[in-house]
Image: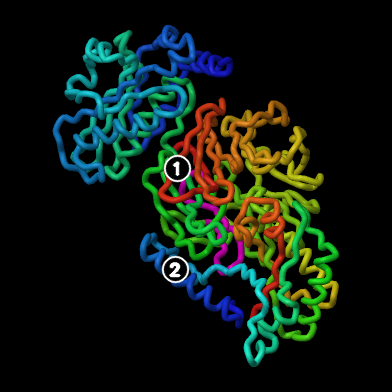
């Protein structure tokens, strides 16, 4: 409870600043219009006096309106059908994150286009709405879609924020995610995260002969696509910050090595021409560097190479296993894993490999550290009997578990550093699934994937 | 890539077949500039006694290798360890004896870990175990250039149970002949 309230206070404190923050200027195509509405001083103070009230904050999201029901090239159908689909996607986004209880278009009446900018507040108030999302979908003459998104406070009869996007019909889900991000950011004070993608490993088959394929999807599991066929085992993918490339481990030709896969051209190249196996690839936040780990003579060390190729620089040089690595958001430091002291522990070094020092001293083994995009915490896998996902401060203090299961591992941060994805392995069957949990550890849910999933890697918010 | 073992050849063929099916069913664009993918290397765990063929195994074959070492192609490791223990020493000595008898033969050492660790680390640990076994064979006079290593981390358990016994079996290095 205490933690929750604290987070809410923080959210309230920053909510006013958010209206004008750069986060809301992120767009899909040129020149988005994002207009902060009137400053909502104290808008939420009456509704968030305790946990329960906040959780039940009624956000109503009726189908987006259209001026004319026009056929579109989008898979979602005509503009009217899209209006309903977009509202459904927003509802799905806002559900299950511990902040909102949205009511979607399935149980709500439609909205005439004229009311999108002048809502019928008494009607929505009567239905129990505290917050109201309206929107519009129109087909532009150039074949694109125009989507408007409006958030209203029903009791104050006030517009809190509005935004418009123009995008290709095939990108209609992105408009929904952008609208959900706009609403989420405005009400929570946090940075957006819905308009982002995930690379992971799709798993099928028996435990002793799993087929493991590289796959990608949107943050809500939509637009799913398998990248590799499964003939060569694929593991541990990471999206590049611009989403154009994926680094991952492939057993192509029977040898485990890191490849850089180009999403658009569907081609790939070896990250390092070496006879040695390479593992655990990672991008730098600016996408200019790739970290990989290479085993030679039984020892594994971490290397850095330009994403363009060229010669690699050895960052660690100790006996034992040094592996992984995750950059701080400013790119100046790297947190990584090493068993040089006898068991897997978390270490920090400068990006050039200097000043390596251990930070985890809380008992058990600590593995797969990942630096928060906010810079203030490190998520990791804690091995103490079971495997759990935990977080610690940058000095190794403040360690706490976010999950409690038989085997949870490999955390990856949401772009806003408020949610962590990881994968869970089931005892005996070896079945895997992707889960996400917020930083309170209380809001945990499984991400839908077509088959079993592991090694999730959450990319940044899309530009 | 494939050995002369009938088991191995058969399973590789099946895998290629299954892979082709998967490809046609899901039809993502295959990378254009890649060489054709072979089936994955199978971590052959043949504990069964060598086939009792009337004529006996072909000298120098995988079957002959297994017959010569009484099927003991695998050594095991303690939790998170990679040192070669006394039992493993005997096994590797027998393997080295065969390898010294057939100097034209090459082997791959497949290193594995149990499931109770993180994926990245277990890949490195499997490589470390395979290398430890390789180094021991080299110390017995086998030329290092005849031995390659590959790690499967925790991805290829030989015992799929989630028990201490199964994990002990899965922490292993397996010697497989290649032609």
Q: In which quadrant of the rendered image does the C terminus of chain A lie?
A: top left
- Which residue lies at the image location 73% right of the left edge and 49% below the top edge? A322
- Which residue lies at the image location 37% right of the left edge and 60% below the top edge? B26
Question: Which is nearer the eye, B48 or A49?
Answer: B48
- Mark 1 — residue? A197
Q: Is residue B33 above or below residue A317?
A: below
Q: Chain of mark 2?
A: B
Tell me the element at label 2.
helix
- Which residue lies at the image location 26% right of the left edge and 28% below the top edge? A105
Tell me the element at label 1.
strand
Residue B132: tell me if it is visible: yes
Locate residue A370, reporting x and y percent. Answer: 62, 39
Residue A448 lies left or right of residue B117; in this view the side is left
Locate residue B98, reporting x and y percent. Answer: 77, 82
Is A416 magenta? The answer is no
Residue A349: tell me if it is visible: no
Locate residue A430, reporting x and y percent. Answer: 56, 51
Pointer 1 local density, CA inside 10 Å: few below 14, some 14–19, many at least 20: many
- Which residue lies at the image location 74% right of the left edge and 77% below the top edge? B70
What residue span does the magenta drawing correspond to? A241-260
**Residue A288 numbered tag:** none
Locate residue A279, reporting x and y percent. Answer: 63, 55
Is A249 magenta? The answer is yes
**Residue B18 numbered tag:** 2
Q: Chain of mark 1?
A: A
Q: CA distance from mark 2 to mark 1?
A: 30 Å
Q: Which of the 4 image quarters holds residue A134?
A: top left
Q: Is residue A103 above or below residue A265?
A: above
């Amino acid at each position: 409870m205490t933690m929750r309230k604290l987070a809410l206070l923080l959210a309230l404190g920053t909510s006013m600043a958010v209206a004008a923050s750069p986060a809301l200027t992120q767009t899909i195509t040129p020149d988005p219009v994002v207009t902060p509405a009137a400053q909502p001083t104290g808008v939420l103070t009456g509704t968030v006096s305790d946990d329960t009230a906040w959780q039940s904050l009624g956000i109503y999201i009726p189908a987006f309106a259209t001026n004319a029901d026009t056929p579109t090239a989008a898979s979602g159908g005509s503009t009217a059908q899209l209006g309903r689909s977009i509202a459904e996607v927003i509802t799905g986004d806002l559900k299950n994150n511990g902040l909102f209880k949205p009511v979607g278009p399935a149980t709500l009446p439609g909205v005439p286009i004229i009311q999108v900018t002048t809502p019928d507040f008494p009607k929505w108030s009567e239905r129990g709405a505290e917050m109201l999302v309206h929107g519009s979908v129109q087909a532009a003459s150039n074949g694109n879609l125009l989507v408007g998104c409006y958030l209203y406070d029903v009791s104050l009869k006030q517009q809190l924020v509005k935004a418009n996007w123009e995008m290709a019909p095939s990108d209609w889900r992105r408009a929904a995610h952008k609208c959900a991000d706009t609403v989420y950011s405005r009400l929570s004070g946090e940075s957006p995260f819905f308009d982002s993608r995930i690379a992971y490993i799709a798993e099928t088959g028996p435990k002793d002969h799993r087929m493991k394929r590289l796959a990608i999807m949107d943050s809500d599991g939509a637009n799913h696509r398998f990248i590799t066929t499964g003939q060569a085992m694929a593991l541990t993918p990471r999206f590049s910050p611009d989403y154009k490339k994926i680094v991952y481990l492939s057993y192509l030709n029977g040898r485990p090595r890191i490849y850089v896969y180009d999403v658009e051209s569907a081609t790939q190249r070896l990250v390092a021409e070496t006879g040695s196996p390479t593992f655990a690839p990672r991008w730098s936040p600016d996408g200019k560097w790739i970290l990989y780990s290479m085993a030679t003579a039984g020892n594994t060390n971490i290397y850095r190479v330009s994403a363009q190729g060229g010669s690699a620089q050895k960052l660690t040089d100790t006996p034992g296993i040094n592996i992984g690595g995750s950059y701080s958001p400013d790119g100046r430091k790297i947190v990584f894993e090493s068993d040089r002291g006898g068991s897997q522990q978390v270490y920090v070094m400068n990006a050039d490999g200097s000043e390596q020092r251990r930070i985890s001293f809380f008992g058990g083994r600590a593995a797969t550290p990942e630096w928060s995009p906010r810079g203030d915490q490190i998520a990791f896998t804690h091995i103490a009997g079971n495997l759990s996902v935990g977080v610690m401060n940058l000095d190794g203090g403040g360690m706490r578990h976010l999950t409690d299961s038989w085997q949870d591992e490999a955390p990856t941060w949401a772009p806003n550093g408020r949610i962590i994805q990881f994968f869970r392995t089931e005892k005996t069957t070896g079945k895997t699934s992707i889960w996400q949990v917020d930083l309170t550890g209380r809001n945990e849910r499984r991400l839908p994937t077509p088959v079993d999933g592991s090694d999730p890697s959450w990319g940044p918010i899309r530009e | 890539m494939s050995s002369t073992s009938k088991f191995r050849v058969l399973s590789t063929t099946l895998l290629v077949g299954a892979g082709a099916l998967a490809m046609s069913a899901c039809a993502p664009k295959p990378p254009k500039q890649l060489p054709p993918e072979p089936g994955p290397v199978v971590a052959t765990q043949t504990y069964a006694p060598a086939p009792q063929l009337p004529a006996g195994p072909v000298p120098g074959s995988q079957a002959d290798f297994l017959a010569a070492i009484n099927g003991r192609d695998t050594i095991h490791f303690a939790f998170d360890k990679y040192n070669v223990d006394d039992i493993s020493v005997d096994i590797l000595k027998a393997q080295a004896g065969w390898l010294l008898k057939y100097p034209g033969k090459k082997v791959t050492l497949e290193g594995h870990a149990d499931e109770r660790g993180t994926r990245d680390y277990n890949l490195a640990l499997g490589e470390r175990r395979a290398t430890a076994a390789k180094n021991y064979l080299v110390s017995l006079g086998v030329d290092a250039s005849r031995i390659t290593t590959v790690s499967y981390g925790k991805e290829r358990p030989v015992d799929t149970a989630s028990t201490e016994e199964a994990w002990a079996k899965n922490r292993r290095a397996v010697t497989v002949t290649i032609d």
